Image (cartoon, rainbow, N blue to C red):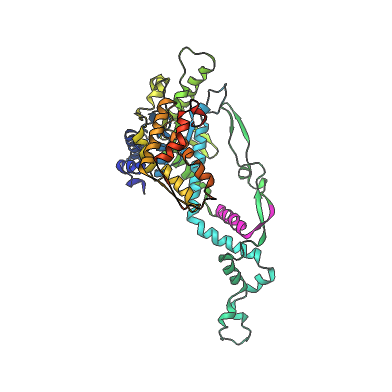
Amino acid sequence: MPIYELTPRKIVSELNKYIIGQDAAKRSVAIAIRNRWRRQQIKDEMREEVLPKNIIMIGPTGVGKTEIARRLATLVKAPFLKVEATKYTEIGYYGRNVDSMIRDLVEISVNMSKQEAFKEIEEKARLQAEEKLLDMLLPASARSKTSTPPERSNESGRAGEQPDPTETKTTREKFRDKLRNGQLEQKTVEIKIEESAMPIMQVFSSAGIEEYGMDIQNMLGSILPTKQVPKKVTVEQARKILIQQEAEKLIDKEKVIKEAISNAENSGIIFVDEIDKIVAREHSHGPDVSREGVQRDLLPIVEGSSIPTRYGIVRTNHILFIAAGAFTISKPSDLIPELQGRFPIRVELTSLGKDDFVRILTEPQNALIKQYQSLIQTEGITLKFNKESIEEIAQIAAEVNSTMQNIGARRLHTIVEKVLEDILFEAPDTKEKMITIDRSCVRHKLTDILASEDIKKYIL
């Protein structure tokens, strides 16, 4: 669906296919995405002034924070990066430089642009790869014969006489038919593969050590010629390699990089998870000073700055940042004031109960029960859950979450897996073609576990 057709209502509708509840969060991200499209439609002078309204999602684990951001990025086909705030620390302690999230986002954007460019030239690259394969398969004598025009190869030698159609089909064309019909897939050919001598180097800078992955051969051009190594592979493998090689020649790399940087700057989404873990605790000393340091390092990135990458300078002014955290032992107001101001939209996601779990198990397109039914179907077995069994699973998940650590919908994975453990193990050997899961089956599998004091041993 084109981005201009994605109204906030349609975005929410698409998210509803995969995520149950959390309407407030869905509305907020839908508005943010629509505003990005609106910004592109206004005049250049005002366009630069319209900054994204970054969002903080507040809620316990397993309620859909990450899933909302991930599905949103897939929906709008935007470069998307998920990072955990705890992997970054103030320089001088441990962890990665905060700037590296922008470099990672640009790498994702470049790969996306390459894939789009490949789709445009795929057919041409495939045809060129086919010609190279034919050159490898045909002996030199056969290739020279096929280069002779058909009218000159007429054995009669009489001018103007049309050759027999059955004789005009050259050896090359016969091989082409075999190639396209898959008759030569396992035949061995020798192909030359480019070998990169120095693909990655570490760069020492004032910001620390970063892996830029610089392409030295591209930088130095013909000074360091590409090394080609011969390798024997099957035709099937050679076709993939040749298509990739031909595509690399056909793709306009400068155009791809330019589009990728533009997409990262104007459409990029960075999801910063566990942002509550970088809030400095009160009355703490020592390593906690690094927590506030991460916030201060993150601040210029969110505010808008220019970050050097291997593809060029990238401005972060219009990247959309979505932060998330449980905030169980802290609150968003504990973040440094400057960073708080850069996340003006705050939405609270609610905990999930039995009714939510029932819907999660059945309604989404990727519902957990549908996944297991597809898995078992590969063994020729139809798996059915009746309504009572689904309600029982949901009830048990809600009870365990209330008595133990609340991990939201992730609890369903461990419970359903335990219920189906024996079926999944025995499926290849069973003769049954229809298995029905009812309430008694669920209780039988889980009653002993629920009665045990050592419940943590069985259900995470």
Say left or right for 330 vs 190. Answer: left
Foreground residue, 252 or 273?
273
Q: Quadrant of residue 183?
A: bottom right
Query: Is residue 17 visible to the viewer in this orientation of the structure?
Result: no
- Against 448, is 113 above or below? below
- Against 326, is 437 above or below? below
x and y, in percent, of residue 224 in the image? 67, 45
Foreground residue, 388 or 312?
388
Numbered range of the magenta stretch: 229-249
Task: Spot the residue most to the left.
Answer: 9
Residue that appears at 63% across and 46% down = 221
Q: Quadrant of residue 29?
A: top left
x and y, in percent, of residue 431 in the image? 51, 53
Query: Is residue 368 visible to the viewer in this orientation of the structure?
Result: yes
x and y, in percent, of residue 85 in the image? 48, 28
Task: Spot the residue most to the top.
Answer: 283
Image mark count: 0
Residue that appears at 46% across and 49% down = 374
350 is within the stretch colored magenta = no
Residue that appears at 35% across and 43% down = 387
247 is within the stretch colored magenta = yes
Foreground residue, 107 or 21?
21
Residue that appears at 67% across and 60% down = 189
Q: Overall secondary structure of the magenta stretch? A: helix
